[in-house]
């Protein structure tokens, strides 16, 4: 009797009498149904959850690497900040305070006289506020030789305070040369001036 004939003679109400081959086939079929059903109804949700967890893991890994990179660069950033503050402090020291402006104007005048130049004009202008600094222009006209004028400009650049020569114009004058220029110097505002500036800005905003 072959398998087909045995299958026809099987009594569904008496599985205990089934041949072993049919029992094994039935067991395999039931197992297959359970596995497929589990995959469809139980494992599907778990697989979706696993995929979501993997995505979260990747997001956390990327965030961790970014934080690690920031932590590594933190010391470098701190050092750069300190260097910037020191450089700013050094530049700030080159700006005179309000009480030092008169001495600076004297230094500019002495720089010209020390080179044997004749001052035909030395007229400080009004200060112009630019943020936390003020700019003061000084109109000057000096007469002397070409070398003396060049040395005077060099001496101005070597002053301990920041002074620039602008709008320079040189023309013949008698046996020498006459130089017209605008010297500009800068100073920082003191706390009182900064407070007054802020009050004026608030008042203007209203």
Image (cartoon, helix red, strand yellow):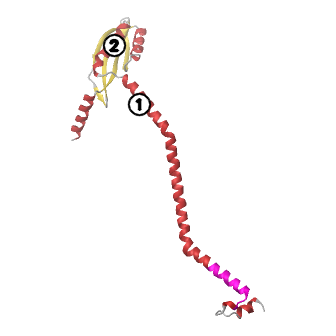
- Left or right, 150 with respect to 73, comes to left
Q: Nearer the viewer, residue 116 or 91?
A: 91
Q: Is residue 52 above or below residue 92?
A: below
Give the number of callouts: 2
What residue is at 56 percent from the left and 71 percent from the top? 43
- Left or right, 33 with respect to 133, comes to right
Say whether residue 21 is magenta. yes
Residue 129 coordinates in the image, percent (x, y): 29, 28
The magenta span reads 17-33
Mark 1 closeness class: few <14, some 14–19, many ≥20 residues within 10 Å: few
- Which residue is denoted by mark 2 in the rendering? 107
Say whether residue 163 is magenta. no
* Mark 1 → mark 2, Cα distance in angstroms: 29 Å
Classify mark 2: helix, strand or loop. helix
Classify mark 1: helix, strand or loop. helix
What residue is at 50 percent from the left and 40 percent from the top? 73
Residue 81 coordinates in the image, percent (x, y): 44, 34
What residue is at 43 percent from the left and 31 percent from the top? 84
Quadrant where the C terminus is found in the figure: top left
Q: Nearer the viewer, residue 153 or 174?
A: 153
């Amino acid at each position: 009797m072959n398998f087909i004939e045995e299958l026809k003679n099987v009594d569904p109400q008496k599985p205990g009498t089934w041949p072993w081959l049919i029992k094994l086939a039935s067991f395999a079929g039931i197992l297959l149904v359970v596995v497929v059903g589990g995959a469809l109804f139980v494992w599907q949700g778990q697989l979706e959850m696993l995929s979501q967890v993997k995505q979260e893991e990747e997001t956390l890994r990327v965030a961790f690497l970014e934080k690690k990179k920031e932590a590594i660069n933190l010391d470098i950033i701190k050092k750069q900040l300190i260097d910037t503050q020191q450089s700013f402090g050094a530049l700030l020291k080159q700006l005179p305070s309000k009480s030092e402006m008169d001495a600076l104007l004297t230094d500019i005048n002495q720089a010209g006289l020390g080179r044997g130049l004749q001052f035909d004009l030395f007229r400080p202008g009004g200060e112009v506020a630019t943020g936390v600094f003020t700019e003061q222009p000084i109109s000057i006209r000096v007469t002397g030789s070409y070398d003396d004028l060049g040395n005077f400009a060099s001496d101005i650049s070597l002053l301990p305070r920041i002074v620039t020569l602008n709008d320079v114009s040189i023309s013949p004058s008698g046996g020498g040369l006459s130089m017209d220029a605008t010297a500009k110097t800068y100073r920082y505002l003191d706390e009182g001036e900064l407070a007054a500036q802020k009050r004026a800005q608030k008042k203007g905003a209203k």
